[in-house]
Amino acid sequence: MACLTDQSENPVISSISDSDSHTERSRWIALYVLCAGVLMIVLDATVVNVALPAIQKDLGFSQSGLAWVVNAYLIAFGGLLLLSGRLGDLISRRDVFITGLVLFTIASLLCGLAQNDVMLVAARFAAGVGGALTAAVVLGMIVTMFPEPREQAKAIGVYAFVASAGGSVGLLAGGVLTQVLSWHWIFFINIPIGIATGYFSLRLLERDKGLGFAHGADVLGAVLITSSLMLGVFTIVEPAATKGWGDITTLLCSAGSASLLVAFLLRESTTANPLVPLRIFKSRNVSGANAIQALTVAGMFGLFFLGVLYLQEVLGYDALETGLAFLPTTLVMGTLSVKFSEPLIMRFGARRCLIPGLVLIAAGLALFARVPVDGNYVTDVLPSTLLLGSGIGVCFPSLMTLAMSGATKADAGLASGLVNTTAQVGAAIGLAVLATISANKTDALLAAGDPRREALTGGYEIAFWVAVGLVVAALAVAFIVLEPAPAREVGEDPGEVTELELETEAGTG
């Protein structure tokens, strides 16, 4: 019998194999390029917080004006995410990503060069616009680049780690750059990263063709949803935070934002070419996952905002020490998201991984609510950060999988923008609510004669318990709204979830 020729000696087969291997490597490198862009955007949202005192001293900001260094970015970023995601579907997700990257990089340069408060706030608004364009389409690009369920779960795990861990990394990076160099470098550091990310994006990301505007553009829908979201974020970060939720300005702005949202929904339900096809909300898993994310992110700000204040105001940590204190959270989160999320989701399904993650987050917040005035990092803080890191590392890859489960190639950018929008709105609401509750309790304790550190700790404690309540509410949504995985066939391995079952659970099968 003739010997079979070794396939490795066949130049045609070898060439095909090499080409497939190169394509596979390129996809994963492209994923890391996308995540580098996301990390830059996420870092910028928190890295500034550590440098605010130095910025105020150097540029002469008033206390109320200083808040606009953060608020200008948040209003533009949160208000434009949904529109940016849909523009990616209609034009080209790659082009929208690169356009946002260029704008964000230029705005970062202007922020670093700012010589007065007006210039810095204007540049921060521009950075928010660029950040929205960049971040909104990334998840949509990932799910189209990795359509196979196992690879998609792994890729989403990498993305989820970058998106969720960037906040704590930003605290550390902001402390280092501000103390070692100056506040200007928290913006200048974005420039080489932005240039490198843009260069590799042009080389590695395939240019996709959007749906186009064959039936016209829903300009009115775009104006309504962008106005509603911008006004909503403004309400949360400005009048609600400074004057309270019962103030007439807060109430009027809230009513205005809600009215614009209702008008947008009516427009989308009646127009022939909606900017946001409302069919995306018909999936219980998509709607439920976004609601869970908003509630969970709102609760998590109990750690990333109030936890920082506790370490600095009560325990006396400086900016660098605060950043290092949250490093274990990032390490645990990264290990679980990148290394274990894919096998866990493939084995048990996204819903079954999500629920234990939420329980761990709630437990971590509850443990932090018990921190004493004279707390010790190892015994009082570290256990909470490890629990939260574990919960986030398990929870968020599952949430991303469920939230993108109803996305088709035609509306993947919209689904991606929706995920980012609910996260930003949840963060803004969580920050405003928890900060207000904490401040009110602290003021009451101070008025009763408690020492400052005891009063601050009492305020943080009640806010942490509210944060626990938000995550428990997210758990309730998970049990009630999310669709359970389909029953397995008799004789099937009870520990193994097939790819078809995972797709069915996510709503795509």
Image (cartoon, rainbow, N blue to C red):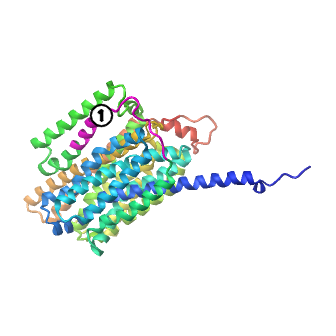
x, y (%) of residue 484? 47, 36
Q: Furthest-right residue in view?
A: 1
- In the picture, measured across the screen, residue 24 lies left or right of residue 58, that is right
> Which residue is under mark 1?
219
The quadrant holding residue 390 is: bottom left
Three-letter amino acid code at the position of disc 1: Val
**Front-lying residue, 383 or 217:** 217
Reply yes or no: does residue 254 show up in magenta. Answer: no
Q: At 35% from the left edge and 53% from the top edge, which residue is drawn?
A: 363
x, y (%) of residue 509? 53, 34
x, y (%) of residue 8? 75, 56
x, y (%) of residue 5? 82, 53
Reply yes or no: does residue 212 show up in magenta. Answer: yes
**Front-lying residue, 327 or 75:** 75
Q: Could you tell me which secondary element the residue under label 1 belongs to?
A: helix
Whether residue 96 appears in this view of the structure is yes
- In the picture, measured across the screen, residue 160 lies left or right of residue 323, that is right
**Front-lying residue, 356 or 138:** 138
Q: At 17% from the left edge and 69% from the top edge, which residue is drawn?
A: 58
In this rendering, the count of numbered labels is: 1
Q: Residues within 10 Å of mark 1 (few under 14, many from 20)?
A: few
The answer to whether 487 is drawn above or below residue 230 in the figure is above
The answer to whether 81 is drawn above or below residue 445 in the figure is above
Q: At 35% from the left edge and 48% from the top edge, which residue is drawn?
A: 133
Q: Start and end of the magenta stretch?
A: 207-231
